[in-house]
Amino acid sequence: MCSPLRSLLLISMIGCVELISVTTPHKHVNVTKGESALLQCMFQSTVQTTTALTVQWDFVSSSSSVLQVYYYQAGKDVIPSSYEGWVQPPYSPGTTKNASISIRNMQPSDAGIYTCQVHNFPDVDGPSEANIFVNVLEKPSKPYCAVHGDVESGHRVTLTCHSEHGSPDPKYTWIRLDQTKTRRPVLGIGTEKGVLEIRNISQFEFGEYQCNAENAAGISTCTIELSAEVGDGVIAGAVIGALLGCVLILLVVWFIAHQLKKRKYNRVKQAEANEMKRSTPQAQQASDHATVATPASNLHAEEDEPHV
């Protein structure tokens, strides 16, 4: 029924004020990233004709910007270009009294408030709109595990775990696995932000650690190994690297010394060869001189002999 006051004010214009009621069965909708979201909106009108029916859907993002998603008037659907191909309009809302829409491939940026407004003149009073809060869930991306500190008995070691993506923000938990992949209690101090601090690590705490990043959309994991061999391997690697460096230096020194010795030997051999070349003509000249002098001495000897 119309109130007396409103009746007095409006009866001369449109008669008794008509009522419209817009409702939604789900004010909060959760949808996983990439899936379609069904936004339900129904209405009731005291006016039987729907020739003046209008339906409008708006979206208010987290940054408070308002976008029109869908508009219906005089039996025609109007979908903005930014939502064209993404929005499934309602089927014959004037007949079915159903103004629900569906939006496919929802992304985290599509999370926010969606408003359904319905008007059917001369209905001018009543709840003409309904709000739906949409939350887009995204499974945590594969987290990255890291270890900080010296993995040696008695030292403090910190493990960190973080996922780049996930909505709502994931919560992180650490567990320790033995050789049979059986869960063991973690003795360190952990936080929901993915940090696990082991202040005084011992051999009983060595092993494989697994980080779970979890939210309403799912769970992702990463693992990391804590072992004294990690630290020993680093030291062994450094020692081996130093030994290889020393061997390389010795090889370089030996090669240089060998080259210098070879050059010195070549110079000595060349000097000896030159000396032999110079001494050969002198020896030849002395030999020739001795050959010529011998007959002359024999001639004198013959002259001195007495004749018989």
Image: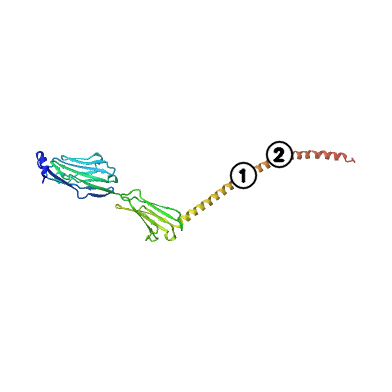
Query: In the drawing, what numbered circle is on residue 260?
Result: 1
Query: Please, what secondary structure does the residue beneath circle 2 have?
Result: helix
Query: Please, what secondary structure does the residue beneath circle 1 have?
Result: helix
Instruction: Specify whether 7 is left or right of 78.
Output: left
Residue 197 percent location from the top left of the image:
40, 55
Residue 155 percent location from the top left of the image:
45, 56
Residue 254 versus residue 221: which sits nearer the camera?
221
Q: Residue furthest front?
A: 5
Query: In the drawing, what numbered circle is on residue 278?
Result: 2
Query: In the drawing, what numbered circle is on residue 283?
Result: none
C-alpha separation, residue under disc 1 versus residue under disc 2: 27 Å
The picture quadrant where one finds residue 61 is top left
Residue 236 percent location from the top left of the image:
50, 54
* Other residues around mark 2 within 10 Å, as few (<14) / some (14–19) / many (≥20): few
Image quarter (top left, top right, bottom left or bottom right) of the C terminus:
top right
Task: Residue type at mark 1: give it.
Answer: Leu
Earlier along the polypeptide chain: callout 1 or callout 2?
Answer: 1
Q: Can residue 105 be seen by looking at this rendering? A: no
Instruction: Specify whether 206 is left or right of 251.
Output: left
Instruction: Specify whether 31 is left or right of 183.
Output: left
